[in-house]
Image (spheres, grey):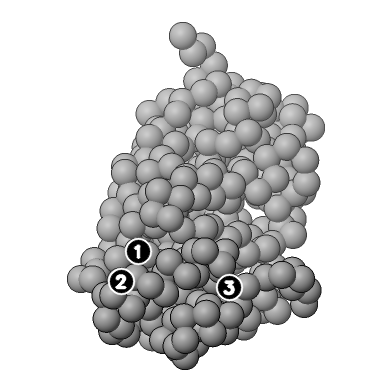
């Protein structure tokens, strides 16, 4: 570790003020009582000498580093190219803005999926976890370190009671399926991920309930997130090998939806003429697909602000709501479900 040749230390200030270094520390931090006259003299001497406290040393004394982290469970499953990390970065932009308003830094923890070597030594005051899987070992490690956590989407692992932003997964799914039915779909399939996230569990529950209420057959395929577009292609090929008359498809993961579109194209099926597709995230992949995909505006900018405010409340030990509802998702209708969109 390098230090400027003429850097002023707390010992230098103490020597000039003829007091002990702990007295200087208390006078500058206000952590313990120092008479107003002495504190004023110490601050003046520190200013005259050009003393700048080491923030790392301050964090050791106070236990605070004035930063929060954004933790995403998404891994190499995220494909390269346009749209990479888009979901996470949309949240990060709004969260960073809110954090800066509160004089905090925002750290983005690199997505790893597996237990991260970063987590045991991560120096932050709190963490926002983005749609964690129930078996997320990184989140478990943070809980064991007693770091305040707020989750975007419920962390449903048994034995945990982490405050969370309710993302309306069930209602969002019913809205998407209701739209497919409204535009004429009568045999609707769902492509879900095998990852143990509350998102997929709630989508599946809403789908089963919808099918029961509307007398529809349950047609569901589960695929690995890491398969991305290829996973969507394979899912559609297998689904249509068993159910050639599917005319509606809900694929919450946008990469699956894009892959499904490619598979349908190779099978000679038109979208939306033969099959209507809805996905969840209104990102680049949804907007730039051919045709553009009907998707959900999750209002992630507002979701991120809610999460930051919840975390700040958690960090300050204020009365904390265990669940705060996100704004209601908005369906953005595009040509993947309605051909003649005016």
> In the structure shown, which secondary structural element does the residue marked by tag 3 occupy?
loop
Residue at 70 percent across and 45 percent down: it is 84
Residue matched to label 3: 54
Q: CA distance from mark 2 to mark 1?
A: 6 Å
- Please name whichever residue, 298 or 247, is drawn nearer the observer in this view of the structure: 298
Q: Residue 98: give x, y in percent of width and height.
A: 42, 49
From this viewpoint, which residue is outermost toward the top?
A: 342
Disc 3 residue crowd, few under 14, some 14–19, many 20+, Cα 10 Å:
few
Indicate left or right for 140 with 8 as reference.
left
- Between the C-alphas of marks 2 and 3, the distance is 24 Å
- Name the residue tied to disc 1: 312
Which numbered disc, 2 or 3, marks the residue that appears first in the sequence? 3
Position above or below: 257 against 61: above
Q: Residues within 10 Å of mark 2 (few under 14, many from 20)?
A: few
- Name which residue lies at 62% across and 73% down: 8
Q: Which quadrant would residue 35 be assigned to in this image? A: bottom left
Kindly identify which residue carries mark 2: 316
Query: Which quarter of the figure is the N terminus placed in?
Result: bottom right
Residue that extends furthest to the left in the rendered view of this protein: 319
Return the mark for residue 103. none
Give the quarter of the image for residue 316: bottom left
Q: Is residue 328 rendered to the left or right of residue 301?
A: left
Q: Secondary structure at mark 1?
A: helix
């Amino acid at each position: 570790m390098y230090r400027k040749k003429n850097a002023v230390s707390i010992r230098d200030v103490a020597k000039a003020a003829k007091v002990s270094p702990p007295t200087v520390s208390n006078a500058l931090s206000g952590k313990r009582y120092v008479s107003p006259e002495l504190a004023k003299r110490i601050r003046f001497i520190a200013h005259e000498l050009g003393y700048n406290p080491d923030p790392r040393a301050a964090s050791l004394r106070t236990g605070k580093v004035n930063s929060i982290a954004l933790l995403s469970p998404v891994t190499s499953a995220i494909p390269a190219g346009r749209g990479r990390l888009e979901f996470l970065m949309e949240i990060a932009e709004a969260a960073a803005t809110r954090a800066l308003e509160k004089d905090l830094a925002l750290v983005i923890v690199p997505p790893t999926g597996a237990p991260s070597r970063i987590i045991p030594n991560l120096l932050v005051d709190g963490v926002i976890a983005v749609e964690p899987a129930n078996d997320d070992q990184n989140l478990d490690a943070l809980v064991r370190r007693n770091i305040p956590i707020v989750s975007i989407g419920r962390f449903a692992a048994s034995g945990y009671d982490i405050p969370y932003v309710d993302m309306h997964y069930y209602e969002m799914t019913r809205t998407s399926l209701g739209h497919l039915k409204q535009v004429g779909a009568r045999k609707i399939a769902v492509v879900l991920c095998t990852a143990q996230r509350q998102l997929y569990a709630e989508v599946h529950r809403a789908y089963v309930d919808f099918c029961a209420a509307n007398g529809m057959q349950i047609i569901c395929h589960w695929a690995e997130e890491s398969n991305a577009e290829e996973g969507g292609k394979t899912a559609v090929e297998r689904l249509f090998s068993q159910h050639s008359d599917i005319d509606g498809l809900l694929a919450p993961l946008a990469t699956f939806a894009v892959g499904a579109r490619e598979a349908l194209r190779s099978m000679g099926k038109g979208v939306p003429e033969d099959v209507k597709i809805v996905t969840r995230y209104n990102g680049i992949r949804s907007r730039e697909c051919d045709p553009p995909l009907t998707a959900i505006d999750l209002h992630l900018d507002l979701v991120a602000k809610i999460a930051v405010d919840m975390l700040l409340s958690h960090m300050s030990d204020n009365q904390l709501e265990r669940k705060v509802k996100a704004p209601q998702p908005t369906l953005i209708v595009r040509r993947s479900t309605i051909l003649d969109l005016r």
